[in-house]
Structures are given as C-alpha cells and as structure tokens.
Amino acid sequence: MKRALLLGNSDGIGLALTRRLLAAGWQVASLSRRPCPVSGLLAHVLADAGSAEFALRLQELVAAHGPFDACVFLIGRGNDFDVTTFAGEEDVLRVNLLAAITTIRIVVPGMVLAGRGHFVGVSSLADELLLHDCPAYSASKAALSSYLNAIARPLRRRGVAVTNMRLGFVDTKMASARVRPAMVSPERAAAWVERCLITRPVQASRPRRMGVLVRLLHWLQRPGVWLRRCR
Ligand SMILES: NC(=O)c1ccc[n+]([C@@H]2O[C@H](COP(=O)([O-])OP(=O)(O)OC[C@H]3O[C@@H](n4cnc5c(N)ncnc54)[C@H](OP(=O)(O)O)[C@@H]3O)[C@@H](O)[C@H]2O)c1
C-alpha cells in the first residue's frame, strides 16, 4: 500500500486531497496546526510551520511513519499588506517558502537513498505576478516555484520526482481576493494534485485558461511598462 505525507490538510485543498487519497487506498500521515477532521490516518501531528519546533515535529513523524512514496506540501498563508508597518511579511515567507524547504531537507534525502519517491509543492499561478495587496505571498510563491523547478532535474536523475503544482483561485478561506476568475472547488484542485501523483510532471498549471490570463497579466506587469506607469 502506498504511503503519503501531507502537510497542511486540516482544511481546504489538503483536506480534500486527504479524502481522495484514503479513498484510493493510500495510507496518509499528516501535519497542520489544527486536527484533520478525517478518520483513518496513520498519524496527524499538530505543529506550526512557522515555529522553531516544526523541523523536530516533522522529523519525529517521518521517523515513526516513513518512508513515504509521496510528500505533498500544501501549507500556505497570505496576509493583508500594511504599507505603514510591513507587519507579518517575514512570516509569510517563513511558512510558504522556508517551511517547504525544511520539509524537502527532512523528507527527500530518504527518497534519494531509496532511489524513488515524489515531492509535490503546491505553489500558485501568482508566482509570476506582482500582487500589490499581498506582495510577500506572490514573492514566496515565485521563490517556491523557482526552487522546485531547479531541484527537479538533479533529483529526477536520482529517481525522485519533483512537481511544482501551480494553482489559480480555489474556493477556500485562502482565496480572499475581491475578483476570483475561473475559481474551482477544493475537490477539483485535489483531483489535479492526485493526478500529478500518477503522471509526475515537473510542473502543472491549473486551470489552464487561468494560466493563459496570468501570462497576459505578467506581460503587462513587465518592468518597462509597469515602472513607467508607477511614476
Ligand atoms: N485557495 C487558493 O485560491 C489558492 C490558489 C493558489 C495556491 N493555493 C495554495 O494551495 C495551498 C493550500 O491552500 P488552501 O487554499 O487549501 O488554504 P487553506 O484552506 O487555508 O488551507 C491551508 C492549510 O495549511 C495549513 N497551515 C496554514 N498555516 C500553517 C502553519 N503555519 N503551520 C502548519 N499548517 C499551516 C492549514 O491548517 P491549520 O490552519 O490547521 O494549520 C490548512 O490545513 C496553499 O499553499 C496555497 O497557497 C491556494
């Protein structure tokens, strides 16, 4: 029976993915700050990915229930940008980016040793945009996507797949923007992630039509055009 480690599954896409993987016969161990409201997990550890004890809690979970065939990092947070204080900006990068890299450091070496395994990082189509309302969020996802894409090649040579899963708007508490084009349900997003666990692409961008819209916005935001408009 295949074994998955999910980080960030008390809610939203992670919760929907947990239900799908259990129904498909996977064994699932997981971590988030709150309990996961699903029975039948191997284990669920409560830990804050932004805290100093996160690495230790994760190491204990991996030692007790690893090795894992797949690890999906879904932990993510946004924040409301406050231009007068810049409060909370580092926290967003600590949780969205550094905790993902800590997870890779703890989980992936075991996969390399075994010559098999799959790490999926859930990033965002916002990784190529300048989000003026939440700049730390788009910066964290840009760095996460870049990191995942960069490690994919050396790891693939060692038998380990890495997928950068870039999502558009998904109907969870995370999607707080006023306008949310092409928004999908968490179940649909979880189905895309589950599909990646079979096809193991280096990168997947969903929904596709949102990917096209983001490319256009990215082009409009290119420095030559954008900085001229900011003056
Ligand atoms: N929703 C969207 O529109 C959208 C679009 C693109 C990408 N994404 C990405 O998809 C991923 C999942 O997001 P979602 O929409 O499912 O959001 P969500 O419903 O808010 O779920 C986020 C999950 O991460 C966990 N989490 C958040 N902060 C944490 C922390 N400090 N330590 C440990 N766990 C933490 C939450 O659990 P606890 O609160 O229990 O800790 C929850 O299980 C995120 O990486 C997000 O950036 C979402």
Image: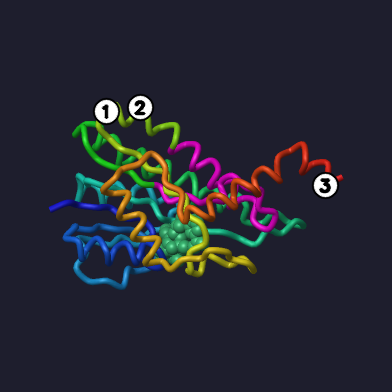
Disc 2 marks a residue whose amino acid type is: Pro
Disc 3 marks a residue whose amino acid type is: Cys
Foreground residue, 204 or 35? 204
Q: Which residue is mark 2?
A: 154
Q: Which residue is mark 3?
A: 230
Predominant SS of the magenta segment: helix
Magenta span contains residue 139 = yes
> Residue 224, how many percent across, how many down?
77, 36
> Residue 159, how many percent across, how many down?
25, 32
Foreground residue, 97 or 158? 158
> Residue 18, how many percent across, how many down?
29, 63
- Disc 2 to disc 1: CB gap under 8 Å: yes
| Marks 3 and 2, how far apart at CA | 40 Å
Q: Is residue 175 above or below residue 74?
A: below
Regarding mark 2 in the picture, which secondary structure is present there? helix
**Quarter of the rendering occupied by the C terminus:** top right
Q: Is residue 201 above or below residue 64?
A: above
Magenta span contains residue 210 = no
**Does 9 sit left or right of 217 as displayed?**
left
Residue at point 77%, 57% (across, down): 84
- Disc 1 to disc 3: CB gap under 8 Å: no
Foreground residue, 85 or 207? 207
